[in-house]
Each structure stands twice: as C-alpha cells, then as structure tokens.
Amino acid sequence: MKKLSKKASADEQKKINSLIITLGLCTLSFAHYIVNPLALPPATMLTISLVSTIASFLPLASAYISFSKKMK
C-alpha cells in the first residue's frame, strides 16, 4: 500500500471539505421544497439557493485552475 505525501493528503482533504460544504448548501437550498422547517421568507431561501449554486461550481473551477496550471 502506497503512502500519500502530506501535500496529496491535504489536497484530498480540501476536496472532501468542499464536497461536504457543497452538499450541505444544496440540502439547505432544496429543504424548502420538502418541508419548510425554518419558515424562512422567500428572499432568504432565494439567497441560500444562489449561494449553493455558486458553491457547487467552486470544486469544478478549482479543478480547472489546477489542471490549467499543470498544462503550462
């Protein structure tokens, strides 16, 4: 079994953290469709939806930037 270097494990941890944050924000954005447990006003739910949508593209943007740096 090959050991990962500290840099590789740190990169993996960043990916896992961004995935957890993205999933959490997406869950919040869709929670009002199921049950509105927090009884939030529509403007707040729209803000949460927009933030989660932007956050869902962050891992993709990060991967693209790191890939483009490797290609140079």
Image (cartoon, grey):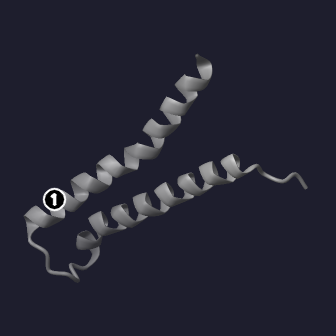
Near-viewer residue (66 or 44) = 66
Q: Residue at x 25, y 70 (%)?
A: 33
Q: Is residue 32 left or right of residue 41?
A: right
Q: Is residue 1 left or right of residue 22?
A: right
Please, is residue 44 above or below residue 40 in the view?
above
Q: Is residue 24 left or right of residue 13?
A: left
- On the image, the x and y values in percent for residue 48 come to 22, 61
Which residue is outermost to the front?
A: 6
Please, is residue 38 above or below residue 4 in the view?
below
Which residue is outermost to the right?
A: 1
- On the image, the x and y values in percent for residue 37 come to 23, 83
Please, is residue 37 above or below residue 68 in the view?
below
Q: Secondary structure at mark 1?
A: helix
Badge 1 crowding class, 10 Å Cα cut-off, few under 14, some 14 to 19, many 20 or more, is few
Which residue is outermost to the top?
A: 72
- On the image, the x and y values in percent for residue 26 come to 35, 61
Q: Residue at x 30, y 47 (%)?
A: 54
Quadrant in which the N terminus appears: bottom right
- Residue under circle 1? 46
Near-viewer residue (64 or 29) = 64
Q: Quadrant of residue 35?
A: bottom left
- On the image, the x and y values in percent for residue 31 come to 29, 72
Q: How many marks?
A: 1
Please, is residue 71 above or below residue 54 in the view?
above
Q: Quadrant of residue 23?
A: bottom left
Q: Residue at x 17, y 58 (%)?
A: 47
Quadrant in which the C terminus appears: top right
Mark 1: amino acid = Leu
